Image (cartoon, rainbow, N blue to C red):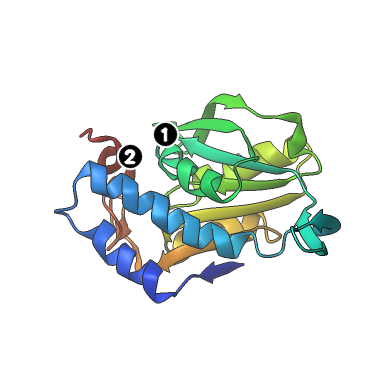
Amino acid sequence: MYEEITHPCVQHKLALIRNVETGHKKFRELATEITMFVCYEALKKLSVKEVDVETPVATAKCHVIAEDIVVVPILRAGVGMLDGILSLVPSARVGFVGLYRDEKTKEPVTYYERMPREVKGGVCIIVDPMIATGGSTVAAIDLLKQQGATKIVVVCVVTCPEGVKRVADAHPDVQIYAASVDAGLNEKKYIVPGLGDAGDRLFGTS
């Protein structure tokens, strides 16, 4: 269902990114670094194939990734995690999904989506710094499955029990990887203690 990455380096960077005094430049850098650590764990079950590689000394039996990888940031905050995962897998394709919350129904509505055809048969990695209520994450997973995706993981910086439960109830086959599972949501549906508004902190808006 979910895995919390408790590596000391991740937790140290998490302390820094939470800090209200951390500016947008440093916030972006930390988001990239945390994403790399969390994605490292999320990708550990990728399929590989054996290849022969000629070294200066002899032929080596090596392994290379045997699956297409599609990274899907949820706009806009998910874009702030893109560099981190592309640093690990530069050959990954990138799809995008934009969602907003309907003021009446409080449910996510898709306003933009663009996916490579490799979502069908590939490994799709949804990235978003925060999974709060889980509504946007579930909507993104729904969209990918409608397009034929069968292997989906979710990578975030922080989430909470409410978000984890909503994703698990809707898609029990999808694993969430996070640097932290925080205490819960407040009355405004913000994660506590959380990061604040990740989009604003990434891009210097308010």
Pointer 2 and pointer 1: residues touching (CB < 8 Å)? yes
Q: Amino acid at mark 1?
A: Arg
Judge from the rendering whether residue 203 lies leftward or rightward of residue 121; answer left or right: left
**10 Å crowding of disc 1: few (<14), some (14-19), many (20+):** some
Name the foreground residue: 32 vs 126: 32
Q: Position of residue 88 (x, y in %)?
A: 56, 51
Q: Point out which mark residue 107 bears.
A: none
Instruction: Name the one closer to the observer, 154 or 116.
Output: 116
Residue drawn at x 66%, y 36% as measured from the top left: 143
Callout 2: helix, strand or loop?
A: helix
Mark 1 residue element: loop
Q: Is residue 95 left or right of residue 191?
A: right
Quadrant where the N terminus is found in the figure: bottom right
| Rendered position, 151 above or below 103 | below
The residue singled out by tag 1 in the image is 76
Residue occupied by mark 2: 199
Position of 186 with respect to 92 (left or right) is: left
Is residue 164 something one can see in this rendering?
no
The tag earlier along the polypeptide, 2 or 1, is 1
